[in-house]
Image (cartoon, rainbow, N blue to C red):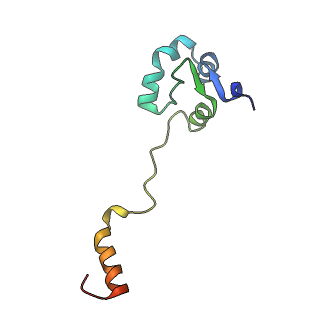
Amino acid sequence: MSLMEEIASLEEVAGALGRKPEWLMRRWLKLHQDHGFPRKHPSGWTWPRSAVAAWLRAGGFMPEPAAPANDNGSVDVEAAYRAMLSERYGGNG
């Protein structure tokens, strides 16, 4: 795959959104801030093709981040470590 296949031009992205390139140039940052639209490449008016495609497949809005699969915030790591040492080597912890 060539690198050109990995990027999408201003015209192509605007067309996918059903807008004119000028509209996208004025509003892409607001779309990014409000709706999770992918950031453009810092050196020009191109976007990562796969990121734009994923955003469009998601309905134009990025889903909220998923909750963590575990809850390590409620664990007292230091107490668990002391208990493990006490169990292994004996003592009061």
**Number of numbered markers:** 0
Q: Viewer-proximal residue, 49 or 18?
A: 49
Give coordinates of residue 67: x percent, y percent. 43, 54
Give the residue drawn at x 34%, y 80%: 85
Most distant residue in the right direction: 1
Q: Viewer-proximal residue, 54 or 44?
A: 44
Give coordinates of residue 90: x percent, y percent. 31, 88
Q: Quadrant of residue 41?
A: top right
Most distant residue in the left direction: 92
Q: Is residue 10 above or below residue 51?
A: above
Most distant residue in the bottom direction: 90
Q: Quadrant of residue 82?
A: bottom left
* Quadrant in the picture for the N terminus: top right
* Quadrant in the picture for the C terminus: bottom left
Q: Is residue 63 above or below residue 75?
A: above
Residue 76 visible from this viewpoint:
no
Give coordinates of residue 27: x percent, y percent. 46, 18
Give the residue drawn at x 28%, y 73%: 79
Q: Is residue 70 above or below residue 53?
A: below
| Image-based side of 79 in relation to 17, left or right | left
Q: Viewer-proximal residue, 46 or 22?
A: 46
Give the residue drawn at x 45%, y 32%: 35
Give coordinates of residue 65: x percent, y percent. 45, 47
